[in-house]
Amino acid sequence: MRTFSPKPQDITRAWHVVDAEGMVLGRLATEVARRLRGKHKPIFAPHVDTGDHVIVVNAAKIVLTADKANQKFAYHHSGYPGGLRSTRYSDLLGTRPEEVVQRAVRGMLPKTRLGRQQLAKLKVYAGPDHPHTAQQPQPLDLPDARQDRTSAPT
């Protein structure tokens, strides 16, 4: 059986907007990464970018569980000896909440040129407004990512 390779004319990209208010960071990031890669589509191929554009609004109101905001660190290296810098996630949420969401999604994408191409389709905003209304994004509901979700019926 030959590997299916979608042609450029087969790929249609939709725009989705996600309201991150009250959502758990990891659960939101997995669904956003899935949409960016195109794994929700029947024409998915791991070597072709078939994903959609995703806009995340209200990133400042994202939730980290189990006190991760105070225990987890974001690291950055300047490239010079002794240039490793660490920032607590609670501080990062206060100053640059877009960076928190982008780091989480980036970690779930391939570490290749394809992954960077897919990450370019992610737009993250701290507040409720975004400049992409001309693209007519469809709201994307992620009930499993909500902090206050009810337990599944047994």
Image (tube, rainbow, N blue to C red):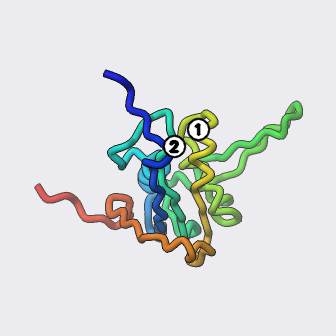
Q: Secondary structure at mark 1?
A: helix
> Which residue reaches farthest left?
154
C-alpha span from label 1 to label 2: 7 Å
Left or right: 120 as drawn, with respect to 140? right
| Looking at the image, residue 29 lies above or below residue 14 | above
Instruction: Please report the residue visible at 68 percent of the width from the left and 62 percent of the height from the top.
Output: 96
Residue 82 picture location, percent across and down: 85, 34
Q: Quadrant of residue 111?
A: top right
Instruction: Please report the residue visible at 58 percent of the width from the left and 40 percent of the height from the top.
Output: 115
Q: Answer yes or no: do the residues labelled 1 and 2 have beta carbons within 8 Å?
A: yes
Instruction: Please report the residue visible at 32 percent of the width from the left and 64 percent of the height from the top.
Output: 143
Left or right: 10 as drawn, with respect to 123? left
| Looking at the image, residue 28 lies above or below residue 136 | above
Q: Which quadrant would the C terminus be assigned to in this image?
A: bottom left
| Looking at the image, residue 65 lies above or below residue 1 | below
Residue 110 picture location, percent across and down: 55, 36
Disc 1 crowd rating (10 Å Cα; few below 14, some 14-19, many 20+) is some
Instruction: Please report the residue visible at 62 percent of the width from the left and 59 percent of the height from the top.
Output: 90
> Which residue reaches farthest front?
9
Res. 90 visible in picture: yes
Left or right: 20 as drawn, with respect to 148? right
Residue flagged by tag 2: what amino acid is it?
Asp
Residues 153 and 49: in front is 49
Res. 65 visible in picture: no
> Which residue reaches farthest right?
80
Q: From the image, tell me which residue sits under label 1.
A: 114
Query: Upstream in the sequence, badge 1 or badge 2?
Result: 2
Q: From the image, tell me which residue sits under label 2.
A: 49
> Which residue reaches farthest top?
1
Disc 2 crowd rating (10 Å Cα; few below 14, some 14-19, many 20+) is some
